[in-house]
Structure formats: structure tokens, C-alpha cells
Amino acid sequence: MHHPADAIRDVLNLADSLKATPLWPDALAGKSVAVIFEQPSTRTRVSFEVGIARLGAHPVVLAGRDMQLGRGETIEDTAKVLSRFVDAIVIRTVDHGKVMELAEHADVPVINALTHAHHPCQGLADVMTIRERFGDPRGIRAAYVGDGNNCCHSLMVVGAQMGMEIVAGCPAGYMPDPEVVAICDAIAREHGGFVRAVEDPREAVTGARAIYTDVWVSMGDDIAEEAQRIAVFTPYQVNDALMDAAAPGCIALHPLPAHDGLEITRSVYHGPQSAIWDEAENRLYVQAALLMHLLG
């Protein structure tokens, strides 16, 4: 078994080479990949579907309403049947337990394309983007400000393996999972970095080469909570003043969709410091590389 850091580095190196190659190899010719979406999706759906096709494989895209996952048919039975048909399963859902159960019973690789707890494909794209801008990510500081959610967790997981310094700045009650922070900090320290969470957004961004944020109100969050969340998160807005508090040449990152004037201002996300469009494009390459790594 590869060390996780080596596997991540292999995937990122492969992603870089795919990005540099207009004509991709038919590395997955004849293979089929089930891509299950239980939530609306733009980047995840398009990037997986395009990536799978460009590698010569066939994407079988299934919306939640197209199948009986966990309702009319158990997750275990679905996993067993899909494993007879396809070479890998990609799933975007809310409940992380559902992905874990699918992986437990499937005989083929299962890729988490987003759950409420983790968004690993996004984390790979984030770190690919940081590497493109700054080279070796070891010792590079990235700040995550706002809601300590799945994107925050995945930046910590991938960043820790790369020896990055990840600082989350989140309000009390919206901190990342302390267990994720503790596990990632221990891993990061083995690789020369650290992971920590603080409440002060300006403290979080001090010395940061990248500032990352995400929406304050996510799909599936209670609308009644929206006004309260906006009030709590307003000091965490990524605006010109917060960018100026970071290291010179700091880039802005966001998994998209962005809400202009809430978690980020237009002057940042459409401005010269934005690496957000590269980051979105890089989803295609890291996911294709991940499939090649698992199936190639």
C-alpha cells in the first residue's frame, strides 16, 4: 500500500501532466464508471463526466431520482449489483455514512464526490492550484475562513499530507470537527506543517499565501437559520481588507458557487488575486488523475 502522501503526490503529478496534454491517453478504454448524484451539481458533474469520457471510459450518470439507493433497495445490494456492471462508483450525497457503506460492500473503488463531512476531490484541486502558484506546498500557509465545513476538512486532510500549514478561522459553533483538526495536525507535523483552528479571521490569514472560503448557507441548510448565519459570518467575509492582511501575493480560493457580497466580494473573486477559475478547472484534472490512479 502506498503511503497516502505518496499517493496524493502521484495523483497531483498525473493531474499536472493531464493539464499539459491536449490529447489524453485512452487510459480507461472499455471501462465504465457509475456517477451518482443525489444533489444538484455543476462542477462535480461536468468535470467527472468530461474527464471519464476523455480517458476513453463511459460515464453512467444517475440522478438520485433515477435509482432506489437506500430507499427501495439497500445500499449494500446496490453496491453489489453496481460492482458487477461498472469499474468504479463516484457518488455525491449528503450522508457520509452512505459513502462508507457503499465502499464497504462494493468490489470496485468508490470515490466520494462530496458529502456533508468531506469533499476530497475539491481538496485535491485546491492543493493542485496552490502548487501551480507556489511550487512545493510543504510549509506553504493557507487560511480557510468561514464555516468549518466539508471543504475546510478536505483542505486540512490533503494539506496535512503535503506538510502545509493550514489555519482555519471560524466562529464559535461553526468550527471544523475537532477530531479532524487533531488527526490532520498530527499528520501535518510528520511532514513539517501543522493544522489549527482559531476564531479570529485576521489571525487566521496572517502569513497566508492562499485564503479559502465557501458559502455561509449550504444546500440543505435551514433557511430560517440564514439570517442568523449571515450575522455570525459577516466578520469573516473575504474582501480586499482581509486579503491585505495576508502575505503579499496571496491568492483567493473558493469551491463555487460563490455568493457575491456575502462570503466573498466581487473585487476579490473576479480580481487579480483570484485563482478560483483555475481551481474550478483543476477539478477535471485531479478527478481524471484519481480515476487513472485507481483503475489505470
Image (cartoon, rainbow, N blue to C red):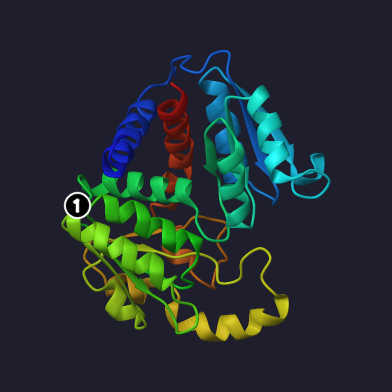
Q: Quadrant of the C terminus?
A: top left
Q: Is residue 90 visible?
A: yes
Q: Position of residue 17 (x, y in %)?
A: 33, 27
- Residue drawn at x 53%, y 55% as measured from the top left: 256
Q: Position of residue 75 (x, y in %)?
A: 70, 44
Closer to the camera in the image, 60 or 272: 60
- Residue drawn at x 33%, y 40% as measured from the top left: 8
Q: Is residue 272 visible?
A: no
- Residue drawn at x 58%, y 23% as measured from the top left: 53
Please, what is the three-letter code of the amino acid marked with disc 1? Arg
Closer to the camera in the image, 216 or 289: 289
In the image, residue 38 sits, relative to residue 53, either above or below, namely: below
Task: Name the residue that disc number 1 marks.
Answer: 138
Relative side of 258 to 162, left or right: right
- Residue drawn at x 39%, y 69% as measured from the top left: 179
The secondary element bearing badge 1 is classed as loop
Q: Position of residue 1 (x, y in %)?
A: 32, 34
Q: Position of residue 227 (x, y in %)?
A: 64, 83
In the image, residue 143 sits, relative to residue 134, either above or below, namely: below
Closer to the camera in the image, 22 or 7: 7
